[in-house]
Image: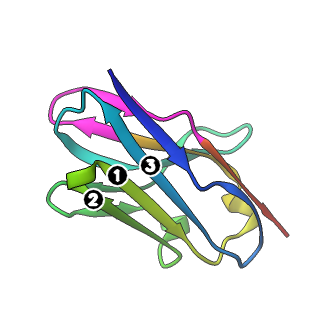
Amino acid sequence: QVRLVESGGGLVQAGGSLRLSCAASGSIPSFNTMGWYRQAPGKQRELVADLNSSGRINYADAVKGRFTISRDNGRYTVALQMNNLKPEDTALYYCNARDWGTRTYWGQGTQVTVSS
């Protein structure tokens, strides 16, 4: 069983920074892609950023230039550095990992709240 555990969420004022981390444990397969999604109240879950094993990175347009994703393949960890946070970034942030087949794994989520 694979477990993804997020950390680093919290409350921050607009313009501030937070760093989210996610670590995988258990019977870890070889992950192709690791990344972050978020879900705000009343909205669908959306991609924030992901990074595949070839180093290709996708960012949501709303976070480009403010968020940076990084990954340590050897330790099965992925991090999200979030700068210049805005109130609209407030959401539950989920760690996501996908293997080379069809399996997708999710963390429990960590809350990020940005006050204006």
> Would you call the spot at circle 1 few (<14 residues within 10 Å), some (14-19), or many (20 or more)?
many
Q: Secondary structure at mark 2?
A: strand
Residue 70, magenta (yes or no): no
> Callout 1, which amino acid?
Thr
Q: Is residue 100 left or right of residue 105?
A: left
Q: Residue at x 55, y 40 (%)?
A: 45
> Callout 2, which amino acid?
Asp
Q: Earlier in the sequence, mark 3 or mark 1?
A: 3
> Would you call the spot at circle 2 few (<14 residues within 10 Å), some (14-19), or many (20 or more)?
few
Where residue 47 appears, as percent x and y from the top left, is 46, 49
> Would you call the spot at circle 3 few (<14 residues within 10 Å), some (14-19), or many (20 or more)?
many
> What is the number of the mark on residue 77?
1
Q: Residue at x 64, y 78 (%)?
A: 84
Q: Tell me the distance, in whole angstroms, between the alpha carbons under discs 3 and 2.
A: 10 Å
Residue 102, magenta (yes or no): yes
Q: Secondary structure at mark 1?
A: strand
Kindly identify which residue carries mark 3.
22
Q: Which residues are magenta?
A: 97-109
Q: Tell me the distance, in whole angstroms, between the alpha carbons under discs 1 and 2.
A: 5 Å
> What is the number of the mark on residue 72?
2
Is residue 59 depicted above or below 76 in this figure? below
Q: Are marks 3 and 1 in contact (CB under 8 Å)?
A: yes
Pick the front one: 12 or 33: 12
> Callout 3, which amino acid?
Cys
Q: Are marks 1 and 2 in contact (CB under 8 Å)?
A: yes
Where residue 98 appears, as percent x and y from the top left, is 28, 37
